Amino acid sequence: MSDSTSDRHQVGDIVTVIDIGSNSIRLSAYGVDDTTSKSDSASSETVPKRLFGKKEMAGLASYVGKDGALTDKGIARAIAAISQLHALSVGVGATKEFAFATASLRNVSNTEDAVEKIQNATGVPITVLSGEQEALLGYESLKLVAKPNSGLMADIGGGSTELAEFDNKQLEKLTSLSMGSLKLYSENVKGILPTAKEAKCMNKSMKRLLNSDLIKDWTPSQTLYAMGGSARAFQKLMNIHGHEGTTFAVSDMKPIIRDLCSGDQEGFKPVLQACPDRIHTLVPGMIIIRSVCKHFGIKTVVVTSTSVRDSYVTMALQGKI
């Protein structure tokens, strides 16, 4: 198996990518067809066919110590999860395997040491994406599945949220906010489920962050295109509450968040039905989405099925990464 983009890939090859996130570590497997096998002429909008995926809920953001470093237990957790996914990659006969890390390893104080230990233990080379690279890949992934003219893209992860503003199908601005659903939870919630008071604290944290200079001159928008595990969990919950499809009114979010933070255990049954593995991060993720919408005056949220993995593997196969 090779991660070298110089090796020629052929029709029928299986290519895998491991996404080392702050909340989950995911493997996606892709099939190379007769368009993606021609990397010299492949369109930037041609994506290999996604075959299957596998997820390990590692929660790496919860293993960050007071010094900002990923702890030894966190590194061991990453090694265990990546080793399992790497074995799966080998087992399906992948001809190429790529691996990248986002805020999970980018926003810790011991990035270089942690990456070295994980690579040595697993044999998997890891690329650590900058926040700007991750935001750009998120926007490129959005273009693979939708052709929006203007709006705001938000990729809500466990340790960060990437934003991209675009108008007339042209990218205008992008940035990475150092707050994701698991980090927001870890910094504000003591139990498993947030209380109304803790929800207020999370809202205040997001308001402070969104009022920073990172997005000082950004343009108000009408539509938010949301991606990532938190966004997909939000969609599932909205569907259970009777809001069908993938497009939702921001005004419908507030009462659902309020009910989830009311302390009524019955109110959390829909979460267990929709996404039991995200019972602790669903409300923080929804607060991030709603806070972004409120800041930019957004009325509508569209949840997309794509991920950074899609654009990453596409560009990697073309030798652009």
Image (cartoon, helix red, strand yellow):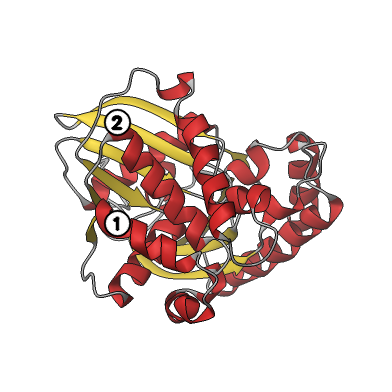
Question: Cβ–Cβ below 8 Å for labels 1 and 2?
Answer: no
Q: Position of residue 157 (x, y in %)?
A: 50, 50
Query: Which secondary structure, mark 2?
Result: strand
69 or 117: which is nearer to us? 69
Picture coordinates of residue 213, whole percent (x, y): 47, 18
Residue that mark 1 sits on: 303
Residue 166 vs residue 295, the one in the foreground = 295
| In this rendering, position of residue 213 left or right of residue 114 | left
The residue lying at 27 percent from left, 40 percent from top is 44
> Can residue 19 be seen in the rendering of this structure?
no
> Dividing the picture into quarters, in which one does residue 211 lie?
top left
The residue that disc 2 covers is 165
- Locate the N terminus by quadrant: bottom right
Judged left or right of residue 75, residue 316 is left
Residue type at mark 2 is Glu
In primary-sequence order, the first of circles 1 and 2 is 2
Element at label 1: strand
> 57 or 40, which is in the foreground?
57
